[in-house]
Amino acid sequence: MPGESNLLADPSERTQYDLLRSRHGMIPLSIRTKLRWCALLGFLAALAGPLVATLPAAVQAVYFIGDPVTTRLGAAAAVLVGVAGVAAAEVGLTGVALYVERYPDPPEEQAWKLVAAEDTASVFGFVTGTLGVVSGDALLASGHWGLSGVSGLIDFGIRPYLTYEAFPATPRLAAVAGLVVGLGALASSLYVDPP
């Protein structure tokens, strides 16, 4: 399989960066795989618009005034925060991959910095991205359980369709941003070599 040749290479043939990364990396996946996970999170964020657009008419009538896809919602803001985390991870991971491609055997000090940058981008992107995208999408999708499901959440103190006028986060914007970030991460994953 492509990408496995580096994993099975003789340790004496591996670069300082590869050795440090394999021993001290927090998430033991190739950069290409991490970028594909970023793409998946971006595409999940892109579901924000369709989730709200397909809400039952009863939920739309009770919880929305006007078009639900263009309403500023707190849950859409959570999705956008997640997309921002995924975008930051995408930029960081792509930068590390491009640097390693250009300078395949960096000195030890630079290799440590690259491992740290990759881990920081990975953890920030996966934690912030996953929390924002999954929680936001789950709140936006809660109306598909019907009025009783949304009422149950409100009884617990969770208002899934809370309008948030301070930030222009609409489900449409979250969907477009998620799609752009997902496509960018997918394109990056196709370009970079798996270190």
Image: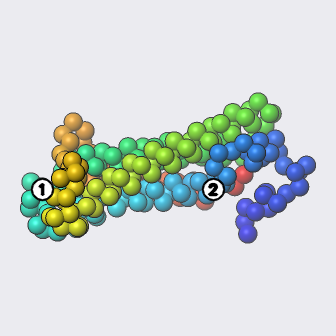
The answer to whether residue 87 shows anywhere in this view is: no
For residue 6, which quarter of the picture?
A: bottom right
* In the foreground, 123 or 51: 123
Mark 1 or mark 2, which is nearer the start of the sequence? 2
For residue 143, which quarter of the picture?
A: bottom left
* In the foreground, 192 or 16: 16
What is the crowding at mark 2: few (fewer than 14 residues within 10 Å), some, or many (at least 20)? many
Q: In the rendered structure, are the residues bearing label 2 and label 1 in contact, judged by CB atoms less than 8 Å apart? A: no
The answer to whether residue 121 shows anywhere in this view is: yes
Q: Which amino acid does label 1 sit on?
A: Tyr
Q: Position of residue 45 (x, y in %)?
A: 38, 56
Q: Position of residue 65 (x, y in %)?
A: 9, 54
What is the crowding at mark 1: few (fewer than 14 residues within 10 Å), some, or many (at least 20)? some
What's the residue at 57%, 54% (across, down)?
35
- Answer left or right for 101 relative to 162: right
Gap in Å between the C-alphas at discs 2 and 1?
42 Å
Q: Where is residue 55 in the image (x, y as percent from the top left)?
A: 20, 66
- Answer left or right for 78 relative to 147: right
Q: Closer to the camera: disc 2 or disc 1?
A: 1
Q: Which residue lies furthest to the front in this view?
A: 156
Q: Which amino acid does label 2 sit on?
A: Arg
What's the residue at 30%, 45% (across, down)?
77
Label 2: which secondary element = helix
* In the foreground, 61 or 181: 61
What's the residue at 69%, 39% (across, down)?
115
Mark carried by residue 63? 1
| Residue holding disc 2 | 32
Quadrant housing the N terminus: bottom right
Mark carried by residue 171? none
Q: Where is residue 9 in the image (x, y as percent from the top left)?
A: 85, 57
Label 1: which secondary element = helix
